Image (tube, rainbow, N blue to C red):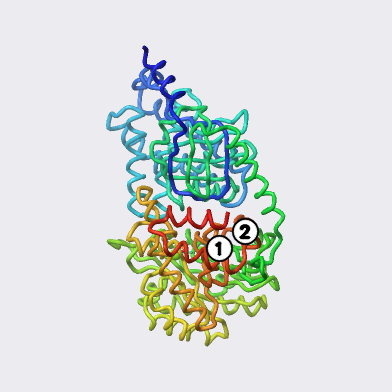
Amino acid sequence: MDTATERSRTRSETPARTLRGTAVVAGVGYGPALHARGEVSPSALAAYGTGGFADVEAALAAYDSAAAEVAAGFQDKAARATGHTAEVMAASAGLATDRGLRGAVRKNLRADEDLLASLHGAVEQFAEAFAQMGGLMAERATDLRDIERRLVARLLGEPEPGVPTPDRPSVLVAEDLAPADTAGLDPTLVRALVTERGGPTSHTAIIARQLGIPCVVGVADLMEVEPGTPLLVDGTTGEVELAPDEADAQRRSEAAALARAAHDAWTGPGRTSDGVAVKILANVADGESATSAASAPVEGVGLFRTELCFLNQSVEPSVEEQAAVYEEVLGAFGDRGHVVVRTLDAGSDKPVAFATLQGEENPALGVRGLRLSFGNPGLMERQLDAIASAARSTGTETWVMAPMVATVAEAADFGAKVRSRGLKAGVMVEVPSAALLSHRMLEEVDFLSIGTNDLTQYTMAADRMATDLAHLTDAWQPAVLQLIAITAAAGREAGKPVGVCGEAAADPLLACVLVGMGVTSLSMAAAAARPVGATLAGTTIDQCGEAAELALAAADPESARAAVLSFLG
Ligand code: PEP
Ligand code: MG
């Protein structure tokens, strides 16, 4: 028997198999596996050889024209996208024609390397520098390698790698997706997204969340699935079933589509089915995202990440300049509800040139967030002045919280500064010590907001950006749930609000668990407001409480999810 026959017989005789990964966007999608186009073909590569250029200038000219074509492709995608996606595409266009990258290619060519080797060396040199910066900058290394793949394809005269346009509703399967792959995905044709790599904060996850496409990342062995294999993807459990029973799969995906239609009809405000109020709030990054979030069914902003307004700035903006930026966000909400402004969380994955310290050995555990004000108290004072000024001029109810608070003394000091400006003060619970001391923190401030992304990273000692640790950076981990429960209980006792503003709030199932623990608000990407709000609206507060008990009693994230799912249905 030849190998192909053997493989196809084995496949048809093998019962449905299930792969598992990290669930990032709830929902069920069913369709044939459509693989993203990978590398160029080895035969085209062999035929290209060293390129046969007469001299360095000729090779550089070929590079320039390939770079221009790749950049034009990104610009085209940027023009068709909006918001964050458009910005990322425009940035990639700039990176493709970056003068520094071109200079490195030329240097390698002059050292007698051929064009493909010169390009590869230059890309690796820059990618390593990005990776060393860590966090969000490390994502630029992925973008750069994606650009290299596209440049090589252009040089060889092959189509650029990426997502082929589906001719029927399909499940998109990839090792990992670059922003260029996910920009412009059509949710009517892409029923689900599954990747072998990537964690809950990867580009794939962010874009899938924005588009509302069910998504599972970090699925081991995924790339061994044959193209065309029917896949049933459950973005709630993280399961990917291969060749499931067709009638059952159709039934489940239709039920999920009905549930989604019910979600789309939800208009707020946040309530359990028996009327307990839970504020559904938006996470925003600037005036533009606040304006767009204001059209979602949210009752305010639970997290305004101010550092994202200043990522590219090398000089600290004046109080007046900052106030103008904050006014855009506060003004977008006016009398719609309160806005929680977070003071600069610069450092680690969000380097801000004018604030972040250089050369830290371990930036995630270093001088980030509130800690930057220890050596530079004026930075915090000026930001608080700017926030207070924007609050006065817009009349919007403004709460202010600090990131990376670890001690009660820090909370007391910050609380006093904020209150002296007539604003409500709070701290984020992102460090396990803050959760364990939440009772005492609440004696010093008016509210707490749990940042589950960092709380998970620091509780599990696992980098939130590390693909290989996605099973640990999961807010369903029992230790993380315990810390959230302690914090929520402290809020109940003190009679003060305790919200969640990390990604956990955007998971409809986990949202019920959090409410059951006593969390009073949930803040998330605006696109998640409807699924979360609608799920809560179908659940009583007692059911939320029981779901919380089930989750807390579970041994691991999988069994916690499964227990809550089977209880809430
Ligand atoms: C968090 O850590 O959960 C959080 C909301 O803050 P960020 O994701 O900006 O670090
Ligand atoms: Mg954080």
Question: What residue type is disc 2 on?
Answer: Thr
* First-in-chain label (2 vs 1): 1
Q: Nearer the viewer, residue 153 or 66?
A: 153
Q: Position of residue 205 (x, y in %)?
A: 50, 49
Question: What residue type is disc 1 on?
Answer: Cys
In this rendering, would 521 be left or right of 357? Answer: right
> For mark 1, what is the residue?
512
Q: Could you tell me if the residues under marks 2 and 1 are in contact, i.e. CB atoms within 8 Å? A: yes
Q: Nearer the viewer, residue 255 or 146?
A: 255
Q: Nearer the viewer, residue 400 or 568?
A: 568
Q: Secondary structure at mark 1?
A: helix
> For mark 2, what is the residue?
535
- Residue 15's tag is none
Residue at the image point whose x is 39% and y is 80% from the top? 410
Give the quadrant of the N terminus: top left
Q: How far separated are the C-alphas under marks 2 and 1? A: 8 Å
Q: Nearer the viewer, residue 208 or 420?
A: 208
